[in-house]
């Protein structure tokens, strides 16, 4: 009843068009779903990006460099609709959009995630100064929603951001790696945690996921997976 009244007072807005969702009670306008681009098989067995043929195990990028993480689960291709939606979450405070995205993640990957028996979800941390200006960490909010639906503990401080980095979208791949070097340090995670899923909103080159995986492995974590809402092509 409380949620119903809240929806009446503050109607839910569509994560794609930004208008009030029709019909009432849905998380996204039915017509707007078509503007999103779900990742389709075949995909790279490491990063989750679409590949040209089922004969390809890995995308070009993952084929030429080793990865510390086991696999990344990716929901959507990072097209213009997804870009606008992710920007609205981060910079316009549209946190309710994550209700739709977390539910979609759990529908698509819930069984696969349960099969790997993760003991923790760890959101990619943002620098304290960025959190103060934004008011929240979108990866943490996403992880909490997914953890609640799948019954997996969330450790918001499993990793800490040791330094403020430049926005990754402004950098090429080598610059991203240098930018993130030693950016993440051990945080609050139970000892002998075997399997962790790192949660983030966007995967592009994998530099952030790799840096997080390296930090977690240094803490003694045996297996690190990734889970991202969007996956984009390398810039």
Image: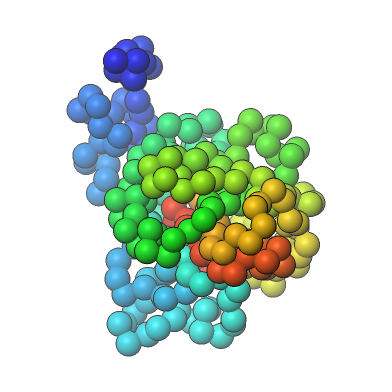
Q: Can you give x and y, in whole percent of width and height, for residue 133 in the image? A: 69, 32
> Which residue ends up furthest to the front in the rendered image?
192
**What color scheme is it?**
rainbow
Residue 186 coordinates in the image, percent (x, y): 73, 56
Compared with 123, 195 (above or below) is below
Residue pictured at 59% horizontal, 81% vertical: 66
**Residue at image x 66%, y 45%?**
157
Residue 164 drawn above or below residue 181: above
Where's residue 162, x and y in %?
79, 52
Quarter holding the N terminus? top left
- Looking at the image, residue 94 sits to the left or right of residue 42; the answer is right
Number of marks: 0
The residue positioned 57% from the left and 36% from the top of the image is: 91
Instruction: Write down the quadrant of residue 137 in the picture.
Output: top right
> If the image is split into quadrants, where does the C terminus sit?
bottom right
Location of residue 216 with respect to 85 vertically, above or below: below
Residue 114 sits in quarter = bottom left
Residue 48 can be seen, yes or no: yes
Q: Residue at x 58, y 51 (%)?
A: 122
- Residue 50 location (% of width, % of height): 37, 71
Q: Describe residue 218's horizontal placement relative to residue 203 as left or right.
A: right
Return the residue nearer the eye: 154 or 74: 154
User: Is any atom of residue 101 visible in this view?
Assistant: no
Depth check: 114 or 12 in front? Answer: 114
Who is closer to the viewer here, 223 or 37? 223
């Amino acid at each position: 009843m409380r949620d119903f009244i809240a929806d009446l007072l503050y109607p839910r807005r569509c994560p794609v068009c930004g208008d009030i969702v029709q019909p009432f009670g849905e998380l996204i306008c039915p017509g707007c779903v078509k503007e999103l681009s779900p990742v389709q098989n075949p995909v790279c067995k490491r990063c989750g990006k679409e590949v040209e043929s089922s004969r390809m195990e890995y995308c070009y990028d993952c084929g030429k460099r080793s990865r510390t993480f086991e696999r990344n689960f990716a929901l959507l291709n990072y097209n213009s609709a997804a870009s606008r939606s992710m920007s609205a979450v981060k910079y316009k405070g549209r946190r309710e959009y994550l209700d739709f995205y977390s539910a979609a993640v759990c529908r698509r990957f819930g069984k696969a995630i349960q099969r790997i028996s993760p003991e923790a979800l760890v959101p990619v941390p943002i620098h304290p100064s960025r959190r103060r200006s934004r008011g929240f960490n979108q990866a943490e909010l996403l992880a909490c929603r997914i953890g609640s639906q799948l019954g997996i503990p969330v450790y918001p401080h499993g990793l800490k951001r040791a330094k403020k980095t430049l926005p990754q979208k402004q950098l090429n791949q080598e610059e991203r790696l240098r930018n993130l070097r030693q950016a993440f340090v051990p945080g609050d995670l139970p000892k002998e945690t075997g399997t962790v899923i790192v949660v983030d909103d966007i995967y592009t080159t994998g530099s952030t996921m790799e840096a997080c995986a390296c930090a977690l492995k240094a803490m003694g974590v045996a297996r690190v997976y990734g889970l991202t809402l969007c996956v984009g092509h390398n810039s």
